[in-house]
Image: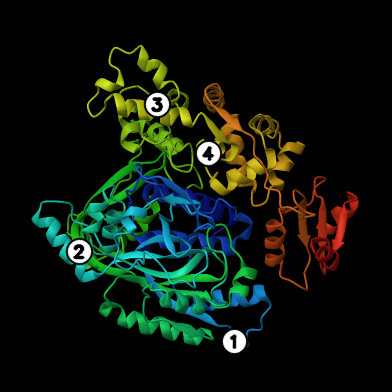
């Protein structure tokens, strides 16, 4: 997709995409209620990446492509991963694969003509899982969760036939095996037939069936489900078992772990694409669902050099298969109101089976998309999906249009509160002006506030928030922490409400009490400020360290000629757009009142910077400028951050080191004006050892 519009239009489009993807992340990971298919979601990410590529000045670290998220279900203990479980970047076209290999070789300074061994394997459409063995015995099993911690599913995993309970005597003392829990197609169909005969839930696809089965609180139920496991990667190990990715797979196979087939080790792009198209042809005949293939740099030492970005390794990518399509009828267009007031159109479809899954809804994204498609109620439409519930409307079958089909008139009032819905000049999204009086926005903001990656209050799920809001028990975040006090004097205490009792009320109050202390970065994220995702919240916390300083600096930064505003813009990946949304939030008196009331109920702990022992640059601010010779710019930044340094995008009085390569320009000049420490590339390498 090519974008052919001005920078201002690009900025508007970028903000819209970021907000929309974050909304779908929350629907999928936090509420377990996705609105769109994998294909539609991937398309949004693809648009975002292409937009960032054409307008790199827009790039901010709140980009959804840099985050990993999944809700830890209530009822499960959590386990913190010794090594984070991240996601993968995606490739959709052959050119994307060519670009991936090119980026890897450029990062490693490998000539295009030189071979590079890359392991290829099917991308299993299942549930990611890690198994920890100590002294050859299975200690625990956990889901990926949010990448940092997951659900403890040990007892359930012990019922899976492909998971060894003990390993051979020659395994390392600590061995974490990572892979995918899945269900074979034939066994999935048998399970659904059994569920239907008993009048129980029918699963949409094998992936959902596997995920639902492994998350049962009763392992006896899991035991009846036909779950399987492929082990193909490692987490923490006390001693290496191989020096290549292919070697790891072969070793795991010798330990008793099943492997997905076919796999191959390729030396160039042509071999990778040949493998991809071979597996694409064989896909219908495989006994399990796959939605693409995965490419991984084979040598582990090269993987270590390449490292990671925010949500994915640089040394691997997933090459997705094209989405499947079908034709159905658009019955209606419903408007949903998000927590930022955005009005999003959702297509209500005549149910249709696409790729073995019955789908009945699809996002139409926005007003412009409806106009672009010229879609009307009653139309036959082509829908497209890949592996999940909700499809994307890709086109209209105009020859089947009814003679009386009328143009869809986009609403100018909010369906939730009746307030005027406006579309500002240059904006793609139409928004409700009702603010906090709009129940849709207030409720969604509260859901975000208590969500997994924010305050993470167990027992306050989406339905409970809606119930409490409707009954007037909570209207603002501070109200959550006053529920217990107010309940004691209530004529209708929680314990007498339907579905509640003494124990459930006690547990809820305990969950709320546990969250009266929260880290600065989670607090900032919980506020739900536009464009402030988890990564950006952490960068802000790293910079300001205390809540009082953060608020004081935001007040002072309202003056765009101030040092405080300059400091805000100097934070890596925070541009004027993100800064303005942040400052707009704190310029609104009502928002300041909400924050003030909240701080009377909770404690926000100071940010504690991670100090890397024996690192001479830990806590220092570094700016790279000019062309580096002995390593790429990306590798230099990654190394600096791994040593605890802060990498800034511009030079200021607070910069500790400016590393100047060849042809350094204005940044070097400014560094000399400010009399800062300027290092050559060799001096920098000597400093960091």
Q: Secondary structure at mark 1?
A: loop
3 left or right of 30 in image = right
Residue 429's spot in the image, x, y percent? 44, 46
Question: From this viewpoint, which residue is outermost toward the left?
Answer: 197
Q: Nearer the viewer, mark 4 or mark 3?
A: 3
Q: In terms of depth relative to the viewer, which is nearer, 121 or 502?
A: 502
Q: Nearer the viewer, mark 4 or mark 1?
A: 1
For the residues labelled 2 and 3, say whether their Cβ atoms are less than 8 Å apart. Answer: no
Q: Earlier in the sequence, mark 2 or mark 1?
A: 1
Distance from the alpha carbon under mark 4 to that under mark 1: 47 Å
For the residues labelled 4 and 2, say whether their Cβ atoms are less than 8 Å apart. Answer: no
Residue that label 2 marks: 353
Distance from the alpha carbon under mark 4 to that under mark 3: 27 Å
Residue that label 1 marks: 115
Q: Which mark is residue 529?
A: 4
Distance from the alpha carbon under mark 3 to that under mark 1: 60 Å
Residue that label 3 marks: 509
Residue 532's spot in the image, x, y percent? 55, 44
Question: From this viewpoint, which residue is outermost toward the front?
Answer: 169
Q: Secondary structure at mark 4?
A: loop
Q: Earlier in the sequence, mark 4 or mark 3?
A: 3
Q: In terms of depth relative to the viewer, which is nearer, 125 or 132?
A: 132
Q: Which mark is residue 644?
A: none
Distance from the alpha carbon under mark 2 to that under mark 3: 44 Å
Q: Residues within 10 Å of mark 1 (few under 14, many from 20)?
A: few
670 left or right of 124 in image = right
Q: Earlier in the sequence, mark 3 or mark 1?
A: 1
Q: Secondary structure at mark 2?
A: strand
Coloration mode: rainbow
């Amino acid at each position: 997709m090519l974008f052919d519009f001005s920078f201002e239009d690009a900025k508007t489009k970028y903000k819209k995409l970021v907000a929309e993807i974050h909304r779908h992340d929350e629907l999928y990971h936090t509420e377990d209620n996705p609105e769109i298919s994998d294909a539609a979601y991937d398309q949004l990410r693809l648009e975002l990446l292409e937009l960032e590529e054409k307008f790199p000045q827009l790039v901010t670290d709140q980009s959804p492509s840099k985050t990993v998220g999944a809700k830890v279900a209530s009822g499960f203990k959590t386990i913190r991963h010794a090594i984070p479980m991240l996601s993968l970047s995606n490739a959709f076209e052959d050119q994307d694969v060519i670009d991936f290999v090119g980026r890897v070789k450029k990062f490693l300074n490998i000539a295009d003509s030189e071979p590079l061994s890359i392991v290829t394997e099917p991308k299993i459409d299942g549930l990611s899982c890690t198994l920890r063995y100590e002294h050859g015995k299975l200690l625990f099993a956990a889901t990926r969760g949010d990448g940092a911690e997951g659900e403890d599913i040990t007892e359930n995993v012990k019922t899976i036939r492909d998971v060894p309970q003990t390993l051979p005597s020659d395994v390392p003392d600590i061995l974490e095996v990572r892979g995918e829990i899945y269900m074979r197609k034939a066994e999935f169909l048998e399970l659904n037939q059994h569920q239907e005969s008993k009048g129980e839930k029918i699963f949409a696809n094998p992936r959902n069936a596997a995920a639902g089965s492994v998350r049962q609180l009763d392992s006896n139920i899991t035991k009846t489900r036909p779950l399987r496991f492929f082990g193909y990667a490692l987490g923490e190990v006390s001693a290496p078992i191989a020096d290549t990715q292919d070697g790891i797979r072969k070793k795991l196979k010798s330990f008793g772990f099943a492997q997905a087939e076919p796999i191959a080790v390729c030396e160039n792009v042509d071999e990778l694409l040949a493998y991809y198209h071979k597996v694409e042809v064989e896909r219908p005949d495989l006994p399990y669902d796959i939605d693409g293939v995965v490419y991984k740099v084979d040598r582990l030492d090269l993987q270590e050099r390449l490292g990671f970005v925010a949500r994915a390794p640089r040394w691997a990518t997933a090459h997705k298969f094209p989405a499947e399509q079908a034709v159905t009828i658009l019955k209606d267009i419903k408007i949903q109101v998000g927590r930022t007031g955005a009005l999003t159109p959702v297509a209500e479809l005549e149910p249709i089976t696409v790729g073995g899954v019955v789908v009945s809804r699809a996002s139409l994204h926005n007003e412009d998309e409806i106009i672009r498609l010229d879609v009307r109620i009653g139309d036959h439409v082509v829908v497209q999906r890949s592996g999940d519930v909700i499809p994307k409307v890709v086109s209209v079958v105009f020859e089947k249009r009814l003679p009386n089909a009328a143009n869809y008139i986009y609403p100018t009032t909010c369906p939730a509160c009746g307030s005027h819905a406006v579309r500002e000049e240059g904006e793609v999204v139409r928004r409700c002006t009702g603010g906090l009086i709009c129940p849709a926005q207030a409720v969604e903001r509260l859901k975000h506030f208590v969500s997994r990656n924010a305050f993470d209050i167990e027992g306050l799920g989406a339905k409970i928030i809606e119930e409490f809001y409707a009954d007037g028990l909570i209207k603002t975040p501070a109200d959550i922490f006053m529920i217990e006090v107010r309940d004691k004097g209530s004529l209708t205490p929680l314990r007498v409400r339907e579905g509640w009792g003494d124990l459930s009320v006690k547990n809820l109050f305990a969950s709320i009490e546990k969250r009266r202390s929260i880290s600065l970065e989670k607090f900032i994220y919980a506020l739900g400020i536009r464009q402030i995702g988890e990564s950006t919240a952490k960068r802000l916390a790293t910079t300001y360290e205390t809540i009082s300083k953060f608020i004081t600096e935001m007040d002072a930064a309202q003056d765009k000629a101030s040092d405080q505003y300059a400091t805000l813009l100097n934070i890596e990946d925070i541009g004027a757009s993100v800064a303005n949304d942040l400052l707009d939030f704190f310029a609104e008196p009502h928002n300041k009142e909400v924050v003030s009331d909240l701080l009377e109920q909770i404690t926000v702990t100071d940010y504690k910077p991670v100090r890397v022992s024996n690192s001479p640059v830990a806590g220092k601010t570094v700016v790279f400028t000019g062309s580096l010779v002995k390593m790429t710019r990306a590798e230099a930044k990654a190394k600096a951050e791994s040593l605890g340094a802060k990498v800034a995008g511009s030079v200021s009085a607070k910069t500790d080191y400016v590393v100047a390569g060849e042809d350094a320009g204005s940044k070097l000049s400014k560094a000399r004006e400010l009399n800062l420490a300027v290092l050559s590339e060799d001096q920098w390498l000597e400093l960091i050892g």
